[in-house]
Amino acid sequence: MSSSEDFKKAIDAGFNFSGDSILLGTAMYDKTAVEKTPVRLPLSMVNRHGLIAGATGTGKTKTIQHLAESLSAKGVSVLLMDIKGDLSGIARPGTENPKITERIQKIGAEWKPTQVPVELMSISNEKGLRLRATVSEFGPVLLSKILELNENQQGAVTIVFKFCDDHQMPLLDIKDFREALRYVTSEGKAQIKEYGSISPATSGVIMRKLLELEQQGADNFFGEKSFEVNDLLRKDNNGFGYINVIRLCDMQDKPKLFSTFMLCLLAEVYAKFPELGDRAQPKLAIFIDEAHLIFREATKALMDQMETVIKLIRSKGVGVYFCTQIPGDIPDNILSQLGSKFQHAMRAFTAKDRTSIKLVAQNYPETAFYKTESLLTEMGIGEALVAVLDEKGTPAPLAHTLLFPPTTRMDILTPEEQDQIVKSSSIAAAYNEEIDRMSAYEMLTKKISAPASEEEAPSTSKKTVVKEDDGGIDIAGTIKAVSKNPIVKQVVRDFSRGLLGMLFGKSR
Ligand SMILES: Nc1ncnc2c1ncn2[C@@H]1O[C@H](COP(=O)(O)OP(=O)(O)O)[C@@H](O)[C@H]1O
Ligand SMILES: [Mg+2]
């Protein structure tokens, strides 16, 4: 083993960056903090994604908190998937305590409480801005993947989308999709002849799978007002990036909905954000706590989509960080794309544990300074084996690191504090308004009567419109009524995105 001086030299040289970076903590040698030997993460490498792993109680969530608040202070926006509900405290400044003081002294850096801007969000009935997406935004390809449909069934879904697109019927929620599917397999059969036909068995399977998704609460998620992902990128007056905390405490038993939501969000971010190139400063960092939930029930097809998105989203300036107990929880093809690793202590209770530890140790670069395998079980709380990329994109020295403590509150918010944040949000009210405007369901169940006036069809529509059909629905008439509404025009335009499947239809 080399001496402590050699160690300090190696770390100082390895983390001597010219560009902006985030201080992660101070390096440790022989399980002792070496003061003022900073371990850093270059900002330009944040979009190379990352992994935060370790046993329960070893400090993973605090690592997320520190990374998130540091990025915010650099003007980078953050999205936190708060599955256990223990991240909300990030919205309030921390208070110094003897443990923090001791840690800071060992690191040899300054600590002061910070106030970061936070938006609370939810995809269910938790407090916060409601995140929703319309079925048409989802598109036939992604919807089929989520429903785990075979090729034939996916064809049927595409027909429903095409039918609704051709007739400018917005598919907003699951109710719309269900009704459209019902319609084209019954009285509207003749109208889809040119695209093909849908057998009762196929439609039955799709209906059943829709029900399954609904039972996990997906009807809360599908609908309007559809979330504009650019709203994630807001900054406050001090130039701090917003930390958007999505409260997902009720997601633990709804893995399908969670993975649906994650994939939809990532796809949307990919579709909307402009290309920045690989070396750009990050725009957004996404942290997914309890990430194994996404993969628990995911099919191969869904995994492939996830892999593709993760690969492509990097050039949009977005970094995705998965947090989980064992790296093995993350599929290999995704794991291999994660540039930064924060490995907290692992527990060696069972034979299986010991196998995972060996495997994890083998995946770290050789180092003269540590015995990685034993270190993995011996690290203290709030310490991690840090393997990040340097500014050139090559691995920085492996560093056992005493991590910087969060400067925001390490405890959770009270319900009153949560209410206060939601109330003071400048965008939450607009998203939380309940809207159920005219869409496929209403149009097909004739809840809306045809308009009296004879206005021109909108210029966005170049499609032939079916007038009266044997089902007796005056689609042309209802479309004119809907098209007066400016939001509808937007949704109609959105159709083409879903249909082309921008990302999912063409990416491979
Ligand atoms: N970087 C840190 N600085 C100070 N205390 C920490 C740090 N990391 C962890 N801790 C302490 O350890 C406890 C557990 O950490 P937590 O992040 O919740 O673990 P995990 O998410 O791995 O279960 C925290 O409540 C805190 O007291
Ligand atoms: Mg945790």
Image: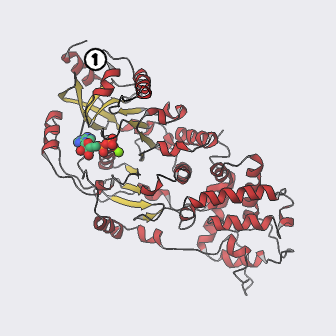
User: Which is nearer the eye, 111 or 181?
Assistant: 181
User: Which is nearer the eye, 212 or 285?
Assistant: 212
Q: Quadrant of residue 349?
A: top left
Residue at image x 51%, y 45%?
Answer: 294
Asked whether residue 394 is in view, the answer is: no
Q: Quadrant of residue 353?
A: top left
Q: Amino acid at mark 1?
A: Phe
**Residue 206 in picture, x, y percent from top left:** 71, 56
Dividing the image into four equal quarters, which quarter contains ligand 2?
A: top left
Q: Quadrant of residue 60?
A: top left
**Residue 122 in picture, x, y percent from top left:** 44, 61
Asked whether residue 139 is in view, the answer is: yes
Left or right of 414: which side holds 131? right
Residue at image x 62%, y 46%?
Answer: 503
Residue at far front of view:
350
**Residue 474 in picture, x, y percent from top left:** 79, 78
In the displayed structure, would residue 69 be above or below residue 402? Answer: below
Left or right of 284: which side holds 198? right
Indicate the quadrant containing the C terminus: top left, top right, bottom left or bottom right: top right
Residue at far top of view:
1
Q: Which residue is mark 1?
A: 369
**Residue 295 in picture, x, y percent from top left:** 53, 42
Indicate the quadrant containing the N terminus: top left, top right, bottom left or bottom right: top left
Residue at image x 33%, y 47%?
Answer: 68
Residue at image x 16%, y 42%?
Answer: 99
In the displayed structure, would residue 362 be above or below residue 454? Answer: above
